[in-house]
Structures are given as C-alpha cells and as structure tokens.
Image: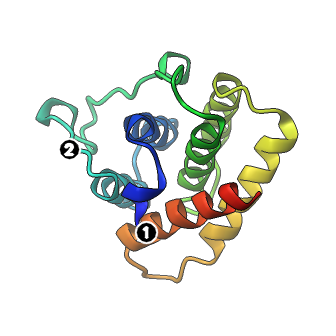
Amino acid sequence: MGALDAISGEARAVLLEALMSVAWADRALVDEERQAAQAAAMGLGLVMPGDRALTSPDRRPVQPEALAIENLKTRDRELIYLCAAWMALADEIEDPSETRVLERLQARFELDDASSSALKERARELRDRQPPGASWWRAFDRLVVEAAKALNDG
C-alpha cells in the first residue's frame, strides 16, 4: 500500500493544502519544507497548476477555515492533521507560526486536545524515525501509510 491507497481521493487535495498552510506559515520555505511539499504532491498524485507552483513566493495556500472538509471522514481529518504536524517538523523545529496553523487546523477538523496531542506525538515519532538523508518522497509515503494503519488499528 502506498500513500495513494491510504487516503481517500477527496482528502488528497485538502491534505496538500493543509501541508502548504503549515509550510508557508512563517512566510518562508526552507529546503526541507520545499522537498517535503514536492514529495507530498508527487506521492498524492496531485499536479499543481503553474500559477500555484509549490515553491512560488506568490503561492497562497487555502486558509484552514476555508478547507473543504464537509465530506471527509474523521479518519481522513485525523490523517491530514497528523501529516500537517509532520510538516511542521520537516526542518526539525516547530515554529510558533506553524503551531498557530496547527491550532487552526485542529479547530477546523473538530479535534479535541487529547486527539490533537496524540496525533502530534505520532508525527514526531515518525519524523524522528526518518533516517538522515532519506528520500522525502519515501518518507512522506511511509508517513501516510503508517499513519493510516495506526488510525485504522486505533
């Protein structure tokens, strides 16, 4: 199973926008965030139109409050939140602006504090297990698959 199989089609675009909201939270993309975002787009089979290139300084992600989540199951919302928390750690530092975006995502996805904390901890565990110099595409694919399995089991 790969990332494409682990998340619903409806949730893929929402996931990419949530990741980009976190990545752009501090108004700058570091190399790790850029690589993680490109890996996510590739792993999810999403192609961004040229005027919304992932690394463009003109790109404005959809605000968390405007994400189209009405048809998403709780499992997809939790998976998206976990992946967004992972993105906040792409450069191994969760910036306060990234924390604020995660809080907005938590509210939008209607996650309680205990669920949010558990998902963030799982994201940290998965990020910490990522070998140095590992392919971001493989890391993202593994993240989505392992997170989906954990959510299915739990």
Which residue is nearer to you in this view: 21 or 4? 4
Depth check, front residue: 63 or 99: 63
* Residue extending farthest top: 66
**Residue occupied by mark 2:** 47
Q: Which residue is mark 1?
A: 1
Which residue reaches farthest right? 114
Specify the quadrant of the image occupied by residue 102.
top right
Q: Residue 126 lies in what quarter of the image? A: bottom right
Q: Position of residue 8 (x, y in %)?
A: 44, 43
Residue 64 in the image, given as x and y percentages of width and height = 54, 24
Report helix, strand or loop for mark 2: loop
Amino acid on which the number 1 mark rests in the picture: Met
In this rendering, the label closer to the viewer, 1 or 2: 1
The number of discs equals: 2
Q: Which quadrant holds the C terminus?
A: bottom right
Going from N to C along the chain, the mark reached first, 1 or 2, is: 1
Residue occupying image coordinates x 72% and y 61%? 153
Q: Quadrant of residue 81?
A: top right
Q: Tell me what residue is drawn at x 26 percent, y 51 percent.
A: 45
Image side of residue 37 versus residue 124, left or right: left
Name the quadrant of the N terminus: bottom left
Q: How is the image coloured?
A: rainbow
SS for dot 1: loop
- Which residue is at a point 35% across and 54% down the rendered structure image? 34
Name above or below for residue 40 compared with residue 14.
Answer: below
Q: Is residue 117 left or right of residue 108?
A: right
Contact check, label 1 and label 2, Cβ < 8 Å = no
Q: Position of residue 65 (x, y in %)?
A: 55, 17
x 80%, y 43%: residue: 115
x, y (%) of residue 145?
A: 52, 64
**105 over 139 or under it: above or below:** above
Q: Nearer the viewer, residue 30 or 134?
A: 134
